[in-house]
Image: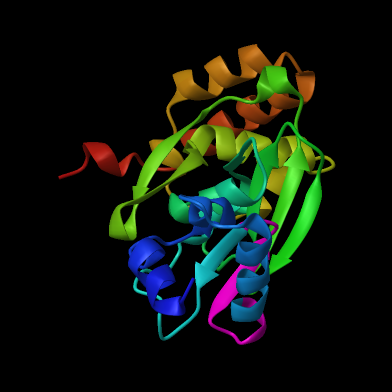
Amino acid sequence: MRFAELLETVGDLPLFQGSLLLAGDRNPGDVRRQLSRWTASGKILQLRRNLYALAPPWRRIQPHLFLIANELHRPSYVSLQSALAYHGMIPEAVPVTTSVTTARPIEIDTPLGRHIYRHMRPEVFFGYGRVSLPHEQEALLADPAKALLDLVYFTPRGEMLEHLRSLRLEGIENLEEEDLHRHARRWKKRKIHRAVENILRMKETVPDRRNQS
């Protein structure tokens, strides 16, 4: 396969799997060797085994970090600080992409960014949905309430009022009380229930701008 053929096949994709190139009668060994050569020459970037992105200047679409996060380690959804930043709830920029997974916890460094995955038991792997991203990309992302409670869960004493205040949460008045309680009921952990109580205490002290003209 020539590089021009690769561009014709995957040029409009933010990410591609090496197995996509095995259509027809192509020899798998030849494809793997060609991918290795293109990686070594800097024409493509290998994110993990069998997952690639075109490198500049051949890249037409910048892969979104959330899409990369979903594809690197499955099953997973973006949560914690990354989701809170996406929802506009924390002021700081997030240098890594944080996700939750039912698989093993892992940290993955790629040419396009660093990804951290925290393990969560399957019964509390919920509270996320598919969101639209630039250039017709999509990713699984925690809703605001679940992203905050995920962070609480993984943080020692994260349910304490002092810690929650230290997060300098923005838009906390937009959190739906029913969402928080519904998530807490499914979690069945005292820590999460205490966190919800403190989040609602904080919410009461913030004017609800949604009701202001």
Look at the image and say whether residue 206 sits in the magenta stretch. no
Using the image, determine if residue 208 lies above or below residue 170: above
Q: Nearer the viewer, residue 120 or 40?
A: 40
Q: Residue 196 lies in what quarter of the image?
A: top right
Using the image, determine if residue 17 lies above or below residue 42: above
Residue 161: x and y, percent? 70, 40
Q: Which residue sits at x=32%, y=59%?
A: 134
Q: Which residue sits at x=61%, y=53%?
A: 81
Residue 192: x and y, percent? 71, 25
80 left or right, relative to 53? right
Q: Nearer the viewer, residue 96 or 48?
A: 48
- Please identify the quadrant where the C terminus is shown: top left
- Tell me which colouring the rendered structure shows: rainbow
Q: Which residues are magenta?
A: 39-50
Look at the image and say whether residue 40 sits in the magenta stretch. yes
Q: Which residue sits at x=26%, y=39%?
A: 210
Residue 92: x and y, percent? 56, 66
190 left or right, relative to 28? right
Q: How many marks?
A: 0
Q: Nearer the viewer, residue 96 or 171?
A: 96
Q: Which residue sits at x=67%, y=73%?
A: 36
